[in-house]
């Protein structure tokens, strides 16, 4: 039996989650030796309960490698082990690393691709979604891929921003790669596969159980060269990914928010604790040690837009719709300009969705 066949058998086993697989690999040295181990040896290892050891031994009788590979191929799924060329090399060096991944799509595997994880809350504001989509799209223009979890809110905005800009993006799922979760993201799921990949350490058919999402977060940060969190409460689940990033030695950037906004409490605290404040895509690139300049024509155009926006603001609060009418700019340009003015201290938002000039 090949290494790949034995690993597929081990990963497909009932209740064989990644921590058990890691312990078995350390104990026995290879999936082939786990295959050869007796029931007594598996139980005596202290890793598996008697019931789990019994089920794993019984599964050998019904395991047909050729049939299993055929099933994966029919679903458009590939199985990568830690020996596969396409296996993300950065994941080999993280604590609690995976030994295998299921994938739909393609991963850039020559080791030169830079990746940024863009993460944040599921329940987020328009500000959080906007920042995620903007940064992801602009990173794509610089040839940098994004990584996220395809959850509602910030994750979806990050993937959407990347695919709309024609970039590469990777979604690390907390379920099988053959399951689109949340279901309303089916169109986005298909586009991610076209322009990148969806990946999971869970076998096909695995339902999205709540406990699996925090576990997969270590892979989101592990695949990235930098983690950017755009919006998060003080106790947001996104901070689990940040914790993993710090343990893995991955730089963390956080988008600052208003001091009285609970949705930005987690980001503001991270900045207090030393995270790099991300007020522009160039900030993110700088934190990664990448020195790039935007196209000068684009830079001048944006400066003119911001100048026009600033000129129509005064001390009387205005909505984005009112600003659109005065400037003739589209909604996206208005929001982008307002975010720039807010981040550079030239505008304020005294009441949600109302903006004034700051002298």
Image (spheres, grey):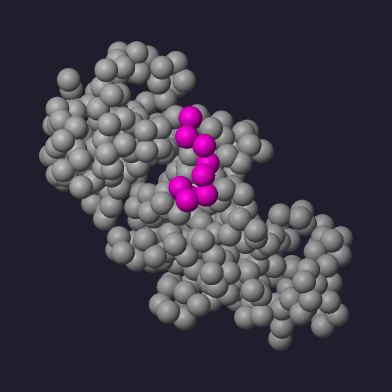
Magenta residues (range): 205-213
Q: Does 254 sit left or right of 90 as displayed?
A: right
Q: Position of residue 95 (x, y in %)?
A: 26, 55
Q: Position of residue 165 (x, y in %)?
A: 56, 43
Tell me which residue sits at (16%, 43%) in the image: 44
Tell me which residue sits at (65%, 58%) in the image: 123
Q: Position of residue 245 (x, y in %)?
A: 36, 61
Q: How many marks?
A: 0
Tell me the quarter of the image containing the N terminus. Answer: top left
Tell me which residue sits at (31%, 17%) in the image: 62
Q: Does 256 sit left or right of 272 as displayed?
A: right
Q: Position of residue 71 (x, y in %)?
A: 41, 17
Residue 231, placed above or below residue 28: below
Residue 344, placed above or below residue 75: below
Q: Does 49 sit left or right of 123 as displayed?
A: left
> Of 308 and 25, which appears nearest the observer?
25
**Residue 230 is covered by the magenta coloring:** no
Tell me which residue sits at (44%, 62%) in the image: 240
> Of 203 and 198, which appears nearest the observer?
203
- Res. 298 visible in picture: no
Dividing the picture into quadrants, the one containing residue 260 is: bottom right
């Amino acid at each position: 039996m090949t290494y790949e066949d034995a690993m597929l058998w081990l990963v497909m086993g009932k209740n064989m989650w990644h921590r058990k697989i890691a312990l078995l690999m350390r104990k026995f040295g290879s999936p082939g030796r786990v295959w050869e181990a007796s029931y007594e040896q598996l139980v005596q290892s202290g890793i598996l309960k008697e019931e789990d050891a019994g089920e794993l031994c019984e599964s050998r009788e019904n395991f047909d490698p050729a049939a299993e590979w055929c099933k994966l191929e029919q679903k458009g799924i590939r199985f990568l082990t830690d020996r596969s060329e396409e296996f993300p090399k950065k994941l080999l060096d993280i604590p609690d690393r995976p030994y295998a991944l299921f994938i739909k799509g393609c991963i850039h595997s020559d080791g030169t691709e830079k990746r940024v994880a863009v993460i944040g809350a599921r329940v987020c504001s328009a500000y959080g979604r906007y920042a995620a989509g903007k940064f992801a799209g602009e990173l794509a223009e610089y040839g940098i891929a994004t990584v996220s979890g395809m959850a509602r809110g910030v994750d979806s905005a990050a993937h959407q921003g990347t695919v709309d800009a024609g970039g590469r993006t990777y979604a690390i799922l907390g379920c099988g790669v053959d399951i689109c979760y949340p279901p309303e993201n089916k169109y986005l799921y298909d586009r991610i596969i076209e322009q990148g990949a969806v990946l999971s350490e869970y076998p096909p058919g695995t339902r999205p159980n709540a406990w699996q999402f925090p576990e997969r977060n270590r892979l989101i940060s592990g695949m990235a060269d930098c983690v950017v969190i755009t919006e998060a409460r003080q106790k947001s689940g996104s901070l689990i990914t940040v914790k993993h990033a710090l343990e893995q030695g991955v730089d963390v950037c956080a988008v600052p928010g208003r001091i009285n906004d609970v949705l930005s409490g987690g980001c503001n605290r991270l900045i207090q604790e030393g995270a790099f404040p991300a007020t522009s895509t160039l900030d993110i690139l700088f934190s990664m040690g990448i020195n790039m300049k935007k196209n000068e024509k684009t830079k001048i155009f944006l400066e003119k837009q911001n100048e026009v926006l600033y000129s129509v603001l005064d001390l009387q609060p205005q909505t984005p719709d009112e600003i659109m009418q005065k400037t003739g700019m589209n909604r996206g340009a208005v929001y982008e300009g307002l975010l720039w003015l807010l981040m550079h201290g030239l505008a304020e938002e005294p009441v949600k969705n109302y903006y004034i000039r700051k002298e």
